[in-house]
Amino acid sequence: MAGSLLLLLDDIASTLDDVAVMSKVAAKKTAGVLGDDLALNAQQVTGVKADRELSVVWGVAKGSFLNKCILVPLALLISVFAPWLINPLLVVGGLFLCYEGIEKVIHAFQKKKGHAHDETEAELSEKNAEAYEKNKIKGAIKTDFILSAEIIVITLGTVAEATLLDKVIVMSLISIAMTIGVYGFVALIVKIDDFGLYLKNKTQAWQKTVGGLLLSFAPKLMKLLSIVGTIAMFLVGGGIISHAIPAAHHFTEDSADYVGSIPNVGTILSSTTPMFINLALGLVAGLIVFIVVGTAKKVFNKS
């Protein structure tokens, strides 16, 4: 009996060791998506009242956990019964991100030229704060669904040869860690201005100085994250499409190799070449989907 117990403990220790190694590899591979996820979700809370920011972040975080509760078992089932479905579903998600990105860019240009007369976010939140927050959370959760799907598929790829138990444990750990990491950091970002105001009201000179710097830095950071978040939509969407289409993936790799062969500057530029190709691919894909959706809407409206 004692021998059986020792064997059981040895099996548990071996499983935990395998899980730790696979989790580390999966975390490294999903780190790039994590950065895009952070930028996109920090962008989603712009325009929300200061005292409601954490509530919105918490609402999106809960939705993200629910997304992963759906996606993890779904990914496991698809990998067993229909592995060929993973890439097409990811491409659809990538196209959706590119489409949303194009919508944001076009809307921004329309506002700049004065063609859009939509009410500002502040006015909307004053009129109907609850409905406005719900729309923000709903939009953020939809975007999170695509990013979560990519994280889970990348993780699934790293544990493809593992046992079912190891797959479940690693994917669950990565999902929990990524969600807590992203939304915990987003919560810190959106409260920078509040912390700055807290320091500004203190008596010591250095506290007032730091508080003033944080207050001036916070709106600039949020504006930057809004821009980075939109670019991230094209990068992630274009990256998904590039990896799913062999011809696009080979073109990206060949381009990076070619640029890398250029004397003096090739080594530096080769690492950024895939990023620029994914960005361009995301922009083109988003524009095509935008035109198709716009045309379809007109046809259906006429009919």
Image: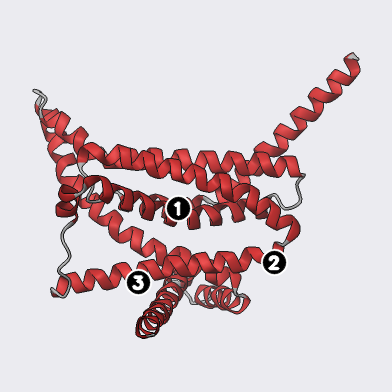
Residue found 84% across the figure and 18% down from its top:
5
Picture quadrant where residue 104 is located? bottom left
Give the alpha-carbon distance from disc 3 to disc 2, as whole Å: 29 Å
User: Measuring 51% from the left and 48% from the top, which residue is drawn there?
Assistant: 67
Choose the circle earlier in sequence order: 3 or 2. 2
Instruction: Look at the picture and state if 85 lies above or below 190.
Output: below
Quarter of the picture containing the N terminus is top right
Q: Which residue is drawn at 66% across and 38% down?
A: 169
Residue 35: give x, y in percent of width and height.
43, 52
Please tell me in which quadrant of the rendered image residue 275 appears: bottom left
Which label number is shown at residue 144? Answer: 1
Asked if residue 248 lies left or right of residue 273, the reply is right
Mark 1 lies on a secondary structure that is helix
Q: What residue type is labelled 2?
A: Trp
Residue wearing tag 3 = 102
Q: What element carries label 2?
A: helix
Disc 1 crowd rating (10 Å Cα; few below 14, some 14-19, many 20+) is: many
Picture layout, residue 18 above or below residue 301? above
Relative depth, front residue between 260 and 187: 187
Image quarter of the C terminus: bottom left
Q: Position of residue 17 (x, y in %)?
A: 71, 34
Element class at badge 3: helix
Q: Distance between the residues labelled 2 and 1?
A: 23 Å
User: Where does residue 212 sit, x and y in percent of width and height?
Assistant: 12, 38
Q: How is the image coloured?
A: secondary structure
Instruction: Check if mark 2's residue and mark 1's residue have beta carbons within 8 Å.
Output: no
Question: What's the residue type where badge 1 is placed?
Answer: Asp
Judging by the rendered image, the residue that carries numbered circle 2 is: 84
